[in-house]
Amino acid sequence: MTALKLMSLALVATGATAEVYMKEKFDDGIDGWTSTDWKKDEMGKWEATPGKWHVDSEEQKGLMTTENMKFHAAYKNFDAPFSNKGKDLVVQFQVKHEGHSYGHCAGGYLKLLPKAGDDTFGGDTEYNIMFGPDMCSYDVSRIHLIFNKGGENLLKKDEIKLEYDDKNEFTHLYTLHLKPDNTAEVFLDQKSKWSGKMSEGWDFPGETIRDPEDPKEIPDPEASKPEDWDDEDDGEWEPTMVENTAPKMIPNPDYGGDVYVYDFAAVGFDLWTVNNGTIFDNVLVTDSLDYAKSFAEATWGKIKDGEKAAKEKYDEVSKPKEEEKTEEAATEEKKEDL
C-alpha cells in the first residue's frame, strides 16, 4: 500500500470523529468566495493558480494576490455558523510568497468573522481572530495572532517571531490550536512556535488579580541585625525592603470566564499587498488537531520536499528567457537612439 493511500485512510479515520467546518482546496478556483471592493479603485484582483512553479499544479492551485500596492479582500461563509464552546478550534492554511525577495512586503493572514460576510467586507469589518504571517521589509517579521474581545483588538504582548529560514518563496503551513482550557498553540510547518495561557499572552482579564492591599515590598527575610548594632547610638534597626515576589492573589471581579469561546460565521482575507504573488491554499477549520495533521500530510506533505527542485528547474528555464528579453529591449532602445 502506497504512502499516499495510507495518508488518505488516516484522513478518513480521523474525519469520522472530527467536525470540519471548512475545507477549502480551491479545486474550483475562486467559486464560493466573494471578492469585495471596500477600497474602490485601490482593490487588486485574485487569481486561482498554482503559481509560476510548482510540484503538482492541481494540488497547489490556490488563491493568489495579483497586483502590487493594492488591497485584496475576499470572504467565504461557513455552511452554518458555529461556536467552539467546549471544543477545540483548529485553523490551518498554507501560504506561499512566490515572489519573495529581500525586503519582501506582504501580509499572509486570514480573519475569522462573527457574522456572515457581505459586500462591505474589508479592513473595517469586525473579526474574532486574525492569524497568519506578516512580513514587511526588515522591521516586520512575525506570525500575527490577534483576538477581539469586547470590540477591542488584542495584540500579543510579545511577538511570535519568524526566523530567517521561515521567510522564503516556498510554501509554509500555519496552524492555530485553541483549547477549552483557555490555552493556545501556534505551529509553523507542524513545529510549535508558541504555546501558553491566553490570559498571559494577551491582555485578557485574568482569573485572579493581585490583592490591592498586599504590600509590593516586604522586609528582606534574609536580613539580620548586625552584631555590633547599638540601638541607642545607631537608632532602631530596620531590615532592608525587597520586592514581594509571592503576592497575595484574589479573584478578579472583571474576569469574564472562558476567553477562548467565539461564535463564527465566515472566513476572510483582507490584505494590503505591497508585493503581489502570495498564494493561499488548503484552508481548514475544524475541532481536531489530529485531523488537521492528517490533512496537512495529504496536501502540504506531498509538495513540501519537492519545491526547491521545482524552483531550480523553473529558474533554469525562465532566467535565460528573461535575460534574452532584457537584451532585446536594450537593443531596441539603442536603435531608437540612433
Image (cartoon, rainbow, N blue to C red):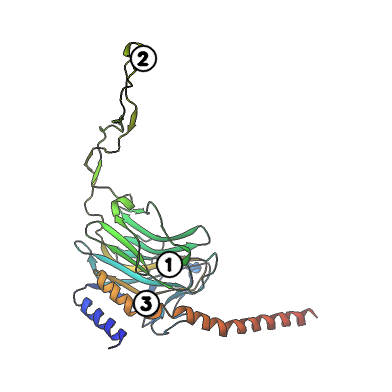
Between 209 and 40, the residue placed more toward the observer is 209
Q: CA distance from mark 3 to mark 1?
A: 17 Å
**Residue type marked 1:** Gly
Image quadrant holding the N terminus, namely: bottom left
For marks 1 and 2, the one nearer the N-term is 1
Of labels 3 and 2, the one closer to you: 2
Residue 18 image offset from top left, x and y in percent: 21, 73
Image quarter for residue 82? bottom left
Q: Secondary structure at mark 1?
A: loop
**Residue type marked 3:** Trp
Name the residue carrying label 1.
108
Q: CA distance from mark 3 to mark 2?
A: 75 Å
Crowdedness near tag 2: few (<14), some (14–19) or many (≥20) residues, C-alpha within 10 Å: few
What residue is drawn where x is 27% and y is 83%? 6
Q: CA distance from mark 1 to mark 2?
A: 67 Å
**Residue type marked 2:** Asp
Name the residue carrying label 3.
300
Between 325 and 300, the residue placed more toward the observer is 300
Figure disc tally = 3
Crowdedness near tag 1: few (<14), some (14–19) or many (≥20) residues, C-alpha within 10 Å: many
In the drawing, what numbered circle is on residue 127? none
Image position of 322 with respect to 112: above or below: below
